[in-house]
Image (cartoon, helix red, strand yellow):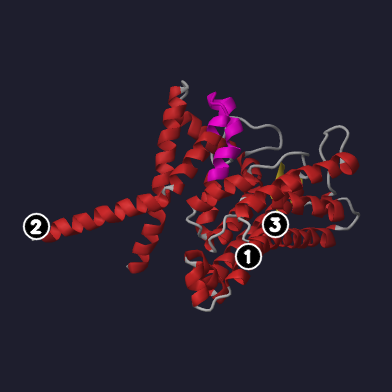
């Protein structure tokens, strides 16, 4: 009974945030002159969670759904990266930059090589872990050794990676037609593109298996290990953790290293999975949207899976929403922003609900 109560308390505030966000988003859609119910249904259709009226050749609701799974796989890793850093009281806003660094490094080392798939795909994952982990560890070290705020250092590294990598792409690896980086080899790609399954051509994301295994691993790390306890203690109070004998600096560096490694996995599953190339001078929004996903999932690895599905459903289905319901795709970003706003108010909402519960209990006692 206590476990059920604890579970309900953990999920009711995110559910309230989602409900309020959808209501506010529906009002905005209605003000623009469109039908909010039709718009929300179009989001489901665009993500393969509801059938469309017609499909192109070799396409169906299943192919749309697999494309949706391919799209939200990097987001799971990115949101886990944010959650691990937050557990130690740190804010990794540099996930997008870490994704870019890992994706670019894996592309030039493996993506443009002639390695076969058996060697190339695992090597891509390993490079993503190493590069992302090194960048995260650097941010943690700067925080611990020089007290440089991790938000500042990660933002500066975002800009550094964005423009330095753009220079190398435009100088050495640019595709003269698309003006993006050259396409990576099929053997190094973590998504099997246009794979014939029966009479359908679908994209099969291999990274989703790794993502779900990582969710379990991160949950175990945070909830069942000594390191997870130390990270939580440091996040609550660094001075108290230090007094208890916990090596605060070590915990900060480790948390950012793990966070960066997860961001690296997000980078390789995006740039060498979902996309297959890199657009110069662009930092993708995945790393920033991951903040909303993590907050909405209550920084719980399992909650993050469901919040990822919701946030990416909104962004993935926005294109079809525009064509089917006549609602601008930018409205999807507005709804995501509102979800982030309500999610950020979790602590206040929880305090108000607990206060109301206490007042109700006291009134009941007085009546007796």
- Mark 2 highlights which residue? 367
Relative side of 317 to 33, left or right: right
Single out the mark in the foreground, 3 or 2: 2
- Tell me what residue is drawn at x 53 percent, y 53 percent: 294
Residue 243 on image: x %, y %: 49, 76
Q: SS at mark 3? A: helix
Q: Which residue is mark 3?
A: 265
The front one of 55 and 243 is 243
Q: Is residue 154 above or below residue 323?
A: below
Q: Is residue 198 above or below residue 117?
A: above
Look at the image and tell me whether residue 51 can be seen: no
Picture coordinates of residue 324, whole percent (x, y): 56, 26
Q: Nearer the viewer, mark 3 or mark 1?
A: 1
Q: Secondary structure at mark 2?
A: helix
Which mark, residue 218?
A: none
Dot 1 falls on a residue whose secondary structure is helix
Point 14% across, 58% down: residue: 364
What secondary structure is the magenta-colored segment mainly?
Answer: helix
């Amino acid at each position: 009974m206590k476990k059920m109560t604890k579970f309900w308390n953990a999920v009711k505030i995110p559910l309230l945030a989602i409900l309020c966000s959808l209501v506010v988003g529906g009002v905005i859609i209605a003000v623009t002159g469109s039908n909010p119910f039709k718009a929300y249904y179009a989001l489901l259709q665009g993500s393969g969670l509801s059938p469309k009226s017609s499909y192109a050749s070799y396409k169906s609701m299943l192919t749309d759904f697999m494309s949706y799974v391919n799209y939200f796989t990097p987001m799971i890793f990115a949101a886990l990266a944010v959650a691990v850093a937050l557990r130690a009281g740190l804010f990794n806003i540099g996930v997008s930059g870490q994704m870019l660094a890992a994706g670019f490094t894996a592309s030039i080392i493996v993506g443009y090589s002639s390695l076969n798939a058996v060697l190339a795909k695992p090597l891509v994952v390993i490079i993503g872990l190493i590069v992302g982990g090194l960048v995260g560890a650097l941010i943690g070290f700067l925080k611990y050794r020089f007290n440089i705020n991790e938000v500042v250092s990660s933002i500066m590294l975002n800009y550094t990676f964005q423009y330095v990598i753009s220079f190398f792409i435009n100088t050495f690896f640019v595709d003269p037609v698309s003006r993006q980086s050259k396409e990576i080899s099929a053997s190094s790609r973590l998504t099997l593109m246009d794979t014939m399954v029966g009479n359908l051509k679908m994209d099969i994301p291999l990274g989703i298996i790794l993502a779900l295994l990582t969710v379990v691993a991160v949950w175990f790390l945070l909830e069942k290990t000594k390191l997870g306890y130390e990270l939580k203690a440091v996040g609550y109070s660094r001075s108290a953790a230090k007094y208890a004998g916990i090596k605060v600096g070590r915990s900060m560096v480790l948390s950012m290293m793990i966070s960066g490694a997860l961001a690296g996995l997000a980078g390789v599953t995006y740039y060498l999975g979902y996309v297959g190339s890199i657009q110069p001078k662009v930092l993708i929004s995945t790393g920033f949207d991951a903040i909303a996903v993590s907050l909405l999932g209550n920084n719980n690895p399992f909650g993050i899976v469901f919040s990822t599905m919701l946030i990416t459903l909104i962004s993935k289905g926005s294109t079809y929403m525009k064509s089917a319901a006549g609602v601008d795709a930018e409205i999807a970003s507005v709804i995501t922003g509102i979800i982030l706003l309500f999610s950020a108010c979790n602590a206040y909402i929880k305090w108000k609900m607990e206060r109301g519960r206490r007042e109700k209990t006291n009134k009941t006692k007085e009546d007796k």
